[in-house]
Each structure stands twice: as structure tokens, then as C-alpha cells.
Image (tube, grey):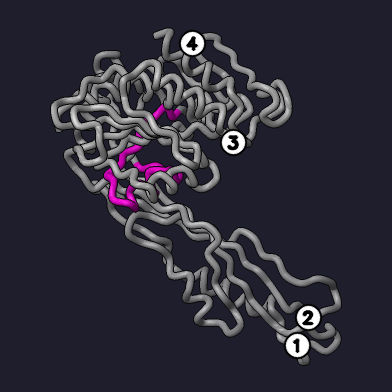
Amino acid sequence: MDELADLTEKLVAIPSHEDETAAGDAIEEWLRTETDARVERDDAGSVLAYKGETNDYDADTLAFVGHHDVVPPADRQTTGEGNAGGYVVERRDGRIYGRGTADMKGAVAACMLAFRDAEPPAGRELAFASFTGEEVGGTGARHAIDNGFAPERAVVAEGSTDYSTPGVTDVVVAHKGRRASTLVASGTAAHASEPEDGENAIYRASDAIDVVRELDAPESTVFGETVSGSLAVTMVHGGETWNVIPERCEVTIDERTVPGDRADIGRAADAVDGVEWEVDQDLPPMACGDDAFADAVLAAAREVHDQLGLDAPEHVIKPHATDAGWLAEAGTDCLVCGASEPGEAHTDTESVGVDVLERCYRIYRGLAERTF
């Protein structure tokens, strides 16, 4: 399917790690040229499109969702600095190489073509969204949601690595979130030769860490599968010089949250005097609450795999957060299904298989035309 590979190369060649405008322009122009959908560009730079009998927000809407920002490229992946130069794109041996091929402009291209080609059943609105700012906390998705983007169901075509079995496009029914937080211990400075005159913030932080170590990591069950989160202290910063009792110590905590459960980190602040808890980032987890939708996506994926003579996909759990978390939090039933291959996303040799993109296109189009 040369059109899919060509469109992927076109999008990948456009720098979008510092400024997503040009990539959004290309997506918007293609949609306006190739479809009769209603196309919008919001204030955050995200591109939204709708087609169907009703062509409005009130229909039973299925959305294909992606993002066109990427992480910064390696030197070998760009022809210049910042957005001044293009990205290097190469196609060889059935693969397309370049920053954003896997995560996730290839899947965005597959979504665009499926959105154009699909003929949804009566009463269904088909939507497409390519967000900005996914790699920096979902700023584009959050802006769109705040301004009315509210599909009933969405397939997030995320291409981040290692959630599918090699050679298979699995369907993610849940993923973990990430909460980054800091315990800030305050004390009183004094000369280290007279420690009793001060209050050692590092000691207070150590007591708080002991509390964190005893906390249970979050855990839940989705589609009969156990989703286990994690909790870990990852950095400790305190003190300014060797002979002064420290008056401040910060403890950084990485928590992988799960649908419906979080660790009680606040207990550490409650238990130790002089310790406060601050949340720095909170990317929500996702769990699909619509069994029929989850089964329909898996059935569509299995049909395509069977036609191609491939092993059958399964419902799986993804360890990383995506924009699906923000959509799920807002009430959209989400699944994640994209061009996930081992060891590709965010690497300086990032690539995607053309056959994998074609597989995704067929799954997306088949799902859009399916009754469920």
C-alpha cells in the first residue's frame, strides 16, 4: 500500500519536537483535500475531523486518536538543528526509518487513511484527532477535552514500544498511569559540630522514606487480568555543604498507578513532622469499561491477522501512559492499538514495518465499518 508508506514518510520528514505547527498543517491540508469531513484546528494546534450522517458531537462517535509531536531526534535523525532542518527518512527492506515512524506518525497516517476510506454504519459518527503535546504530558488532549472533544469510544493508535507480542498487533484494554511526586522535608540549619542545635532534614526524609517502603503498590483487575503498579524512591537531594546540618531534603517518588488504585503516599507526610507531599505530574491510567467495544476491536484485529496468516492477537495490558488516560478520565471508553514493535520508539534507530502499518490500517477500517 504505497499511499500509506508515502504519507508516513511525508509526515515523518516534518520536524515536530519543538514546534508541531508544520506537521499539523500537513495533516489538516490532507484531510481537507482527501475527505469531505468537517476539519478543525484548535488553539493548541491539534487537528480534529468528523464525518458521518450527523456530523456533530451528539452522535455515537468512534474516534481514531494519535499525536504528531515526537521526542527530540538524535543527530543522525535530523538534517539540521531544531525545526530549521528536516528529519532523515529512509525506506529499505520493508521498513521506514526516522524519528516518529513508530511513535507515532506511521499510525497517524494509517488512521487518516482509514478515516477517509471507511463507510461507518448508519448512526455512527467517525472522528479523527491528532493531538499536540502528548510527549510532554498530554497538553493537546487535555485542551481538546476541555473544549468539548468527547467521543463515546476511541482507539488510541499509540506506537510506543513493547506492549504487543512480536509480529502481532495486540489490543490494550488497560494501561498504567504515572504519578511523579516529591516529599519535601524541612529542618533547621546548624553547625555540624553541634547537631543538637538543628533539626536534620535528611533524617526526617529518611523517616518518610521508611514509611514509603512499607506502602503497598497499587493493584487492580481489568478483564480478569491483574494490573500491578509500582512505587519507588528514585532521587534524594539534601544538604549544601559537609559541615552544616541540612535544613531541606527532597525525595523524588515514581509511582505507576493503575485503574482505581493509588498508593497512600500522603501517609509519609502525615507520619513525620516537617514533611510535606507535592504532586509534580499525574498522568492517569486507563481501563476500558465497554466489554462489547473491547471484544469488537479484538475481533476486527483477529480477522485481519487470520487473513494474513498471523498469530491471533490478544487483550493485553500496557505499562506506559498515553492520551487514552485523559480521554478515559473524561468518560470516553478507550482502547490502545497501534504499530508497537520491540525496541523502536524513542530510539536513534527508530523504524516501523510497512506491513505493520498496513495491518493497523485494515484493523482501523474494519472496526469503523463494524456494528457493535
What's under tag 3, amino acid-wise? Val
The residues bearing labels 2 and 3 have C-alpha atoms spaced at a distance of: 41 Å
CA gap between label 1 and label 3 equals 45 Å
Q: Name the residue under label 3.
A: 71
Answer whether labels 4 and 2 touch (C-beta < 8 Å): no
Distance (Cα) linking label 1 and label 4 = 66 Å
Point out the stretch of residues depicted in magenta. 317-340
Residue under label 4, please give it: 94
Percent from the top left, x then y, of residue 126?
A: 26, 30
Residue 262 occupies quadrant: bottom left
Amino acid carrying mark 1 in the image: Gly
Residue that carries the numbered disc 1 in the rendered image: 198
Q: Label 2 amino acid?
A: Ile
Residue type at tag 4: Gly
- Mark 3 is surrounded, within 10 Å at the Cα level, by few (under 14), some (14 to 19) or many (20 or more) other residues, namely some
The picture places residue 303, in percent across and down from the top left corner, at: 22, 21
- Asked if the residue at tag 2 contacts the one at tag 1, i.e. Cβ–Cβ closer than 8 Å, the answer is yes
